[in-house]
Structures are given as C-alpha cells and as structure tokens.
Image: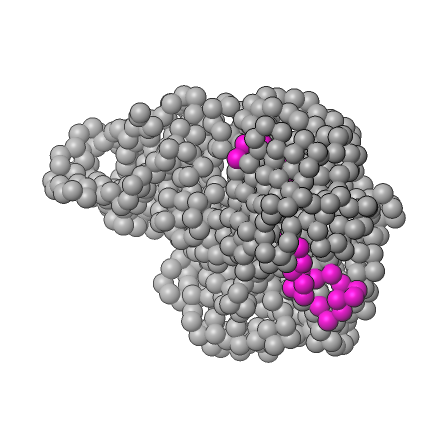
Amino acid sequence: EELARIDGESLALGTVDSISPTASYDPWVLLTDPESVYIQPDLAFRRAVSARVVSQSDEGFAAELTHDGGQKSRLEVSIEADGRYRLSIVPLDPGHVAYLSVGASVSPDEAYYGLGEYFDDVNHRGKLRAMQFEPSTLESGYNEAHVPVPLLLGTKGWGLFVESSRVGVFDVASADPTRVRSIFGMGEQAAEGLTFHLLAAERPLDLTKLYYDITGYPGLPAPWALGPLVWRDENLDQAQVESDLDTMRDLDLATTGIWIDRPYATGVQTFDFNAEQFPDGAAMIDKAHDLGFRVGLWHAPYIDKKAAATKALLQEAEAAGYLPPQFGIPLNPWGIIFDFTNSAATAWWQDHLDYYKGLGIEGYKLDYAEDVSLPSLGEGRNVFRFADGSDERTMHRGYTLKYHETYRAMLPEAGGLLLTRAGRWGSQVLGPIIWPGDLDARMIKHGDPIEDDGEMKRAVGGLHASIVAGISLGPSGFPFYGSDTGGYRHSPPDTETFRRWFEQTAFSSVMQIGTSANNVAWEFGDSALLDSYREYTRWHLRLFPYTWTLAHQIATTGHPIQRPIGLVEPALGAHPSDEYLFGDALLVAPVTEQGATSREVIFPSGRWINFWDGTVIEGPTTVTVSAPLGALPLYLRAGSPLPLLRDTIDTLSPTVDPARVDSFATSVGRLWIRVASGPEASLAMYDGSVIAQKTEGGRSDVQFTPGKEFSEGAIVELIGWGAAAPSSVVVGGANSSALPSASALRTADAGWLHDPAKAGGTVYVILPSGGALTSVSR
C-alpha cells in the first residue's frame, strides 16, 4: 500500500537573487501574508523535475536533482531500520537558496497528528502550524507555540520528522488537500541542507517509537511528581506554606508535592529565601518532608537588572562574560537571559543552585526563557549571539534545551520535578512535564471571544484547550503533561470550571493544581467542591501503579500515556479533541461545556464499563451519556486490569508520621485490581508484577503474580458483576469464604465480598501475598 509519495513537488528550493544576512527568512509570512512587503519579490520555489542516481548501495542511494530553474541539489537516502528512512537535501549552489521545502503527496481523507502543543484541534488537516512564536490576535498577542515539534504523523501509518531547529512552518493539506508541505528558512546556512526522516508503521500509534529511535526516549520524572501537586501563585510567607501543609493532611487531601512560586527569594535570581518572608526555609522544607511532601521552586534564567538585591550578582556575571555577547529584545520584566552555552556560566549558576539542593529542593518550575523564541521582527532578525557561536536562528528552540539541562543536572539521579513551559524535539530525554502556560480559567475554547479589560479578544482557551494540548503532545514525544488545574488567566475559576477541570486532570498523566488567584480547594467555601476534590485527587494518586507502568512501557512501545482516539483506531474516522484513551484500559471523556450535564462520547471498538455505575456500552458507537457535576464520564475496557493503590493513600513520598500520613513509600500495602469480565488480557507492571484476566462462560479468572514492590497480596475488584452474588469464589484452588462486611476487607487475610450497589455490582476477593489465581463463578 502506498502511504505517501515523495515527488518533485515535495522537494523544492526557495531561491532569491541574493541572501541578506539581516533577514530572518521566517517562512510563516510566505503562507499567511503572501503580499507582505517582507517577502523578496524575486523569491521562487523550484521543484525537482529530474533525478540522476550518482551512487547506490544496499543501504541507500544518492541522486543529483535538477530543479525547474536549472538549480541542482543532492538528495541522499538511507535505510536506517525497518520503517525508518533518513533523507537529506543539500543545494549545490546554496548562495541563492533562502528556503528548503520537503513534503509529500497524500491521501485527501487522511488525518494528521503530532507537531507538538496546540490548543484548537488534535487533527492538523487544513491547518498551518508554525515551529516558532508568531504574532497573533489571541489575547496573549502570540500564537502560543511553546512546544512545536516538526513531527507529522499520518493516520495511514506514515510520518515525517524534519530534523531542524530553524524557523519553519507546516502546511498540513491546507492549500491543497492532497499535499503536506514543510518550509524551513535557511538564509546564509543553506549549505547545511535539510535532514528529514520518513517513518512507516502498521499502526499509526507506533510511529512515535521510530521518532524516539532518532531523538532519544523520554526520561522519567520522579514518581512523586505523578501524584497530586499543589501550589499558590504567590505565598504570603512561611507561615502560610506551613499552614497549607498541615491543612492538606488534616483535611485528608491526597498530595505528594508542592512548589513555591515567586516571590520567595530576595530577588530574581538571588538564590536564597527572603529572610523577612521565609525566616527559616530549611525548617519549612523539613516540615514538608516530615509530612510526606516533596518540594520544588519556581525559577527563570535571569538576574533582575533593577533590584538592589541582585546588583552584586549581576555585576559578577557581566564581568565574567556570563551573558550573551549580543542580545535582542527581551520578553521578560527582569533583564537579559543567562548564557547557558558557556560552560563556566552554567557551572557558576549551578554553584548557586547548590544552596537549594542542600535544603532538599527536588524540583523546579522553569518559566520564561522564551526571549529567543521570537526569531524575527517582521522579516528582520531579532539577533542573539551566544558564547558557543550559535544565534537565534537555531537557538530560538535550542536555548530552552540548555536551560532545562542546567536544572536537570541539579535534581536527584532517580529524577525530580522538571516542570517546563517550553520544549523542543529531543528535550524529552530530560523527563520534563510540560505545562501549557497561562490558559483561561473558563470553560472556553481556543479562539473564542473573551472580554479582557473591557476589550473583546480571542481566548487562548480554557479546559478544552488544555485537553487538546495534552492529547497532541503525547504522540509528539512529550508524554508527561499537566495544565494549571482551574486555569490561570482571569482567575479565579467558578466552582463548576474548577470541578470539571480537576475531574479531568485526575485521570491524566500529571495533576498539578493552582491558579493565579492564589486560592486553593479548601478556600472556595464549598463543601461539595471540597468533597469532590478529595475524591478525585485520591483517584489520581491511586492510579499511580497504572500510570507508572504506562510511563515505563514507553521505552518499549513508544506509546503516549494519553492517546488520541483517532490515532489509536483510525478506522473510526473520528478525531475528537475532547476525549482520549488513558493507556489501553480507560476512556476519558471530560465535560468542557459550561452548564452541561451530558455529552456525546465516541466509543472505540470493544466493551466499555462505566467506571461508576457499571453500565455497559458496546463499541464502536457514539452515545450521549449522562454527566452530572462530580461524575466524569469514565469507562473501563472490559477485560483490561487496572492496578490501583489502596483507597486511604495520602502520598508517594516518605513520612515520619505514618499514623497521620498514609504513605506508599512507608508501606506499599496490598495492590487493588479493578477489572471487568471480558476478553483475555494481561498487564505486566513496572515492578514485574503480572495481572491476567480471562472470562469463559460464567466464570472470571484473575491471576496475580507479585513483583518486587507489590508483594503483600492484592484485592481484586470485579465490577459490573450484577446484583446476584457469585455462586462460588475459589482462590488458589480452595473455596474462599464470604466476609461479613466491607470493613473486613481491610483487616482479613482471606475472603470475598459482594456489593450489589457498587459499580453495577462488585465482587471483592482478597489474594494472598504470594499471589494466586481466583475464579469467580455465576
């Protein structure tokens, strides 16, 4: 089957009479404003019209291409692995080549994923996507391209990865429904050529693994970073932080970590705690650790040029040459970015970070650093030059990588929290969690009208935009994602928005909770909200064995944690932006419309069991389901085991007070296994534990084999069983006895219980520490 065709139109040179060293050659304007005065009038794109093979081997070939203006280029093609091909095009007369363009002739009905973080739609067909910041009519003033990735994935099973850090744009079947095209601005560097990769896989979801084979597999954050994380936009002082720590434990709110946002230091960056605001930062962090919290800090790569507290540090950095030799327009309120391409400068910065490391700081929220991400002003350059000789033409993405590498080196070897607003291809190896910046604290879509200071503008987007971004980033190489639960712009969110948002983030890879209004869940004054928040944060924490298993599986499958339905099952012909598969086992369909109490859900193939009431839906189908506030539309795939922590768990982090704080690090405890009867399926967990389920006739078998961590037995939770109790329950070949009450599940060594009112009728079975097979019969 032909997936895509690389023809002469797919390989083009953008030529001009002369190359200007002051022009940015940003191709965005070529497609969005073709009449712009910034476009050189003599620009012409020259497609390849003939090819002559000049060398050939078993691994590939090289050819000389002739383009329609007589220009020539060299095309090299090599087979790197099964389904992975490396190509490069190099102009033979680069002095007149301003742009290089690669693409493909494609099917008119194919959908496209990848390309990084976008907020409007997961399917890019019909869209133009910039690989850098561009001016925009959005309320932020720019296009929000914090994490563009030049990786396009087609639903027929092919992909295109352009291995370039230069300014670029993808036309995804916008001008022509049968053609995808990328254009990269080369300018004076056209002689370097453009390297790109063609990918092919039987299943489109497998394409990202081929991309990882080229750019590196994602690093893992610390396990605690995947538990609920809480922050305030501004902390009053140390007393408030310590009060919040106590309150979360007193109110039984599952939380594994916090970070302290600015301001907390004497200045940006003084690498200290403000003594008036935080008189004993070490004691505060120790208290957090004692109560089972890990701690991170907000940081940015600047030394404030205005603050008296930073004057000496800034003078020292300037005298040592630690700032870029040349810098453009800053996009921050503090000053010039630090030059992390200078190894001495990086070491100096890390020496100052050692103070925080010594106090026990294990994570950083890395903000800003996107000054270089504006590579062009009109068609002119926003010039930055760095110590290593690089400039903004590649460092518009390369700078954030250097910045993030500097901080990753300061985290524990086992991982920490690296929460980043920006990213680029390849930076996934650092294990970042992407947060999408300042979304609207509203139930509003990207581009919808919104009032801002009396003016009508186009919204960045709220909950819906956050979901789109998370689904888009996973196949693009960033599996860990967490928006500010509740939003940031126009905070505080109303109670409905906040509740719908934490319902969704509870069933996602990362749940981080905070808004710009500084209020936290227990300060809304709404007991129903707080009860629901307690329930959903605990569900997120209980999911840790499942989420951590999915994280470890990336190294072998390449599959994202949050998976687009249209990429998993292209045959459906549906590409929803507001629902996704969380691994293989869960279908998540959040409510994103204000006031809605139902929504339409697209169900992939298979049998799906409502997580809360056990209702069964056979897919593929589309159904309008009930979705009252507090009940996220959530479905478990029949047969697929879902491993969970116990329902009393508070944290993944160690604690000195296990009587007050139920910690996984202190006691692993029994594994809970939620499953519904269905097709044979198994799950190999991150610690080597294996869960297998098989249903034949009226009997469901669940086998648990313990691994290195989960060795204290398990409780099987067989949902959707029905109102009638089982006729028999056998564990390890022997009949098991019914337990008298639900409370006995927590204390008994063996037994089973039937609860007809729970999730369509649930059968609970206790399995011993050595593991066992249980057979539950009707």
Q: Residue 659: where, in percent of width, then height?
A: 79, 66
- Most foreground residue, 682 or 266: 682
Q: Residue at x 14, y 43 (%)?
A: 57
Q: Residue 373: where, in percent of width, then height?
A: 49, 51
Q: Is residue 387 visible?
A: yes
Q: Dividing the picture into quarters, in which one does residue 121 lie?
A: top right
Residue at the front extreme? 734
Q: Residue at x 61, y 33 (%)?
A: 699
The span picked out in magenta is: 655-680
The verdict on residue 667 being magenta is yes
Q: Quadrant of the C terminus?
A: top right
Q: Dividing the picture into quarters, in which one does residue 194 lie?
A: top left
As displayed, is residue 678 above or below residue 643? above
Q: Residue 166: where, in percent of width, then height?
A: 39, 48
The verdict on residue 40 being magenta is no
Q: How is the image coloured?
A: one colour
Residue at the left extreme? 54
Q: Residue at x 37, y 44 (%)?
A: 210
Q: Residue 309: where, in percent of width, then height?
A: 66, 75
Q: Residue at x 40, y 28 (%)?
A: 156
